[in-house]
Image: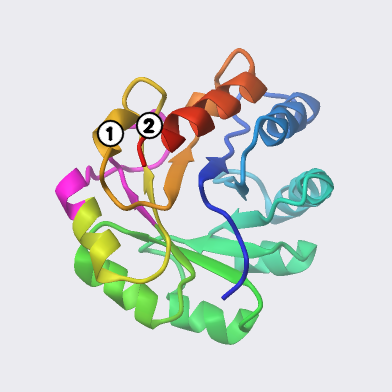
Amino acid sequence: MKHFDSTLYFITDSTGYSEAEFLERCEAALRGGATLVQLREKEKSTREYISLAENLHAICRQHNVPLIIDDRIDVAMAVGAEGVHLGQSDMPVGTARKILGDGVIIGATAKTVPQAKEAYEQGADYLGVGAIYPTTTKVKTVLTSTETLGDICRAVSIPVNAIGGLNNDNIDILRGIPIAGICVVSAIMKANDPEIAARSLLETFKTLK
């Protein structure tokens, strides 16, 4: 399996920022210890998405952190990103694996044990499970219980990350669940100082083990 660390999985949201501001916040998150970065853009044109991905990929490379592209296999291939993340309405993991080959990280969203098992059997490298809490991002969220999260962790042998509204004040709910890490958007993206926010999240997560 590809080498990656999903302990602090930072998912971006460029809403309300200039490109320069957005990239600076992403770089700050990397300085703070983000171990994996996912570029998620729902409204940009393909050309805009590729351009932004190229610029973010250059920053990620400087920090030796893999870049994951949300949804768009074409964008991931265009910029040579290390991986792609697929939701339940996106291309099936097995199909993506045929296109991308074995060397690319493929992550999948799973909200139930059957979805998790299916993604794992089709070749997913990690799972994002949630939403644990309601989120403020522009994606439809269906809440997932911590009990289901634990069941999914025990059902597959790949890393499982919790996602959805997680921050320093509420991740204690994950204590004792054998997750590999947490996925965060707003807790870093909207922080006054993304570097400090990332470092603090990483430290807090480590206390849950």
Q: Secondary structure at mark 1?
A: loop
Say left or right for 88 vs 32. left
Q: Residue at x 41, y 68 (%)?
A: 158
User: Mark 2 or 1 closer to N-term?
Assistant: 1
Q: Secondary structure at mark 2?
A: loop
Q: Does residue 106 lie above or below 38 as drawn?
A: below
Report the magenta stretch's main SS: loop
Where residue 182 sits, quadrant-wise, is: top left
Q: Residue at x 76, y 47 (%)?
A: 60
Q: Which amino acid is tagged 2?
A: Leu
Question: Decide: marks 2, 1 in contact (CB < 8 A)?
Answer: yes
Residue 45, image x and y in percent? Answer: 68, 50
Q: Which amino acid is tagged 1?
A: Tyr
Q: Residues within 10 Å of mark 1 (few under 14, many from 20)?
A: some
Start-end of magenta stretch: 128-148
Quadrant including the N terminus? bottom right
Magenta stretch containing residue 72, yes or no? no
Say left or right for 61 vs 124. right
Residue 189: tell me if it is visible.
no
Magenta stretch containing residue 145, yes or no? yes
Q: Residues within 10 Å of mark 2 (few under 14, many from 20)?
A: many
Foreground residue among 159 and 19: 159
- For the view shown, which residue lies furthest in the top direction? 192
Q: Which residue is mark 2?
A: 166
Q: Which residue is mark 1?
A: 133
Q: Residue at x 84, y 46 (%)?
A: 62
Total numbered labels: 2
Say left or right for 73 vs 124. right
Q: Residue at x 67, y 68 (%)?
A: 74
Quadrant including the C terminus? top left
Residue 24, image x and y in percent? Answer: 77, 27
Q: Does residue 77 lie above or below 9 as drawn?
A: below
